[in-house]
Each structure stands twice: as structure tokens, then as C-alpha cells.
Image (tube, rainbow, N blue to C red):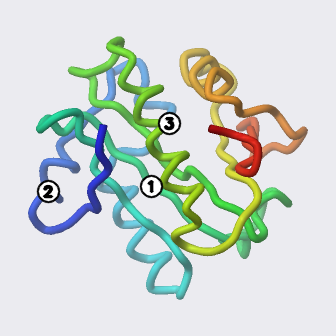
């Protein structure tokens, strides 16, 4: 499993990744995510986008940010911490245990503190997305009692994982 930054060389391949039709309500499409990353970076905030590869196959997309908390409804855990803002595995590569492998790879990368020193990694998921909940909890994420709208916030302590 390998993370590569989204660049002009892989941009359109990343944009063309898709989740299964019954998952579209759970995650924004990658073009929207990349636009949000661009706008957030232009506001001076720290964001990184990744193409996820298994061997030489592009299998997914991830987006992280650090210390981005200046928005209405931001959870308290956002301050001085990392966020797994977007994470998806393409429909062709789902159900092959690549999600957990990619998540472990991302966590290892974030533990290197590439954007700043943080103690936690958080994410949120739609409560009806049972597959996401199972994946994130298997990786060690736990609820911290916060919500973003209707989404449940899960947190991973970076100092005690992997």
C-alpha cells in the first residue's frame, strides 16, 4: 500500500474513482473534495490529498487536514489535531481488505506529524454507514461524544496506536 500526493499526473484518475451507488450519500465525490482542499489551502490552512495505490493500481483517495477548526459546527477535537476529512476505496477494489490496509498506511503517515504536532486523529461518519463504522472502530477509533451535524465523531489517540 502506498500513498502518493494528488498531482497533475494522477488528478483525473483520482477524480474518476467512484464508490458503489448505495454509498454515494456517505462521501462527497473526489472532484468536490479536491475543490474543497484547494479552497482550504488558499485560506492558509493545512490540507493534503492522496491517491492510494495497491501495487501499481490506483484504488482510493484520502484527504487530511490539520488544525482546521474555524468553521461553524467544528468539533472541539479539531483544534491542534488531524482530521481524516475524506477516505474512499473505489468500487472495483472494495471487499478486498484494502480499506483497513489504506487506513493503517494513512495513520502511520499522520503519526510522522507532516503538518504539525497533534495528539489525535478524528473523523466523522454517517450513522447509517455501518461498513465505515466497522472499519474505523477496527482501526482503533472510538466515539468522543461529539457530532458534526448528524455525523458521529470518532477519535484515534495517535500516541498509543500502531
Give the residue at mark 3.
Answer: 104
Residue density around tag 3, few if under 14, some if 14–19, many if 20 or more, within 10 Å: some
Residue density around tag 1, few if under 14, some if 14–19, many if 20 or more, within 10 Å: many
Give the residue at mark 1.
Answer: 63
Q: Are marks 1 and 2 in contact (CB under 8 Å)?
A: no
Q: Position of residue 11 (x, y in %)?
A: 17, 59
Residue at mark 2 to residue at mark 3: CA–CA distance: 22 Å
Which residue appears at 54% of the width and 52% of the height? Answer: 85
Label annotation for residue 162: none
Label annotation for residue 10: 2
Q: Is residue 49 above or below residue 116?
A: above
Quarter of the rendering occupied by the C terminus: top right
Q: Quadrant of residue 135?
A: top right
Q: Secondary structure at mark 3?
A: helix
Q: Quadrant of residue 90?
A: top left
Q: Is residue 7 above or below residue 30?
A: below
Q: Nearer the viewer, residue 34 or 6?
A: 6
Q: Of the residues tagged 2 and 3, which is closer to the observer?
A: 3
Can see residue 150?
no
Amino acid at each position: 500500500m502506498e500513498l502518493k500526493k494528488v498531482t497533475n499526473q494522477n488528478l483525473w484518475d483520482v477524480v474518476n474513482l467512484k464508490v458503489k451507488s448505495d454509498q454515494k450519500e456517505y462521501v462527497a465525490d473526489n472532484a468536490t473534495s479536491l475543490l474543497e482542499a484547494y479552497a482550504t489551502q488558499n485560506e492558509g490552512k493545512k490540507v493534503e490529498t492522496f491517491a492510494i495505490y495497491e501495487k501499481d493500481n490506483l484504488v482510493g483517495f484520502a484527504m487530511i487536514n490539520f488544525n482546521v477548526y474555524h468553521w461553524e459546527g467544528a468539533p472541539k477535537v479539531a483544534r491542534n489535531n488531524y482530521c481524516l476529512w475524506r477516505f474512499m476505496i473505489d468500487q472495483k477494489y472494495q471487499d478486498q481488505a484494502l480499506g483497513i490496509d489504506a487506513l493503517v498506511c494513512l495513520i502511520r503517515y499522520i503519526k510522522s506529524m507532516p503538518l504539525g504536532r497533534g495528539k489525535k486523529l478524528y473523523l466523522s461518519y454517517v450513522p447509517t454507514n455501518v461498513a465505515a463504522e466497522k472499519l474505523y472502530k477496527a482501526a482503533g477509533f472510538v466515539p468522543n461524544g461529539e457530532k458534526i451535524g448528524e455525523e458521529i465523531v470518532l477519535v484515534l489517540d495517535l500516541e498509543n496506536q500502531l
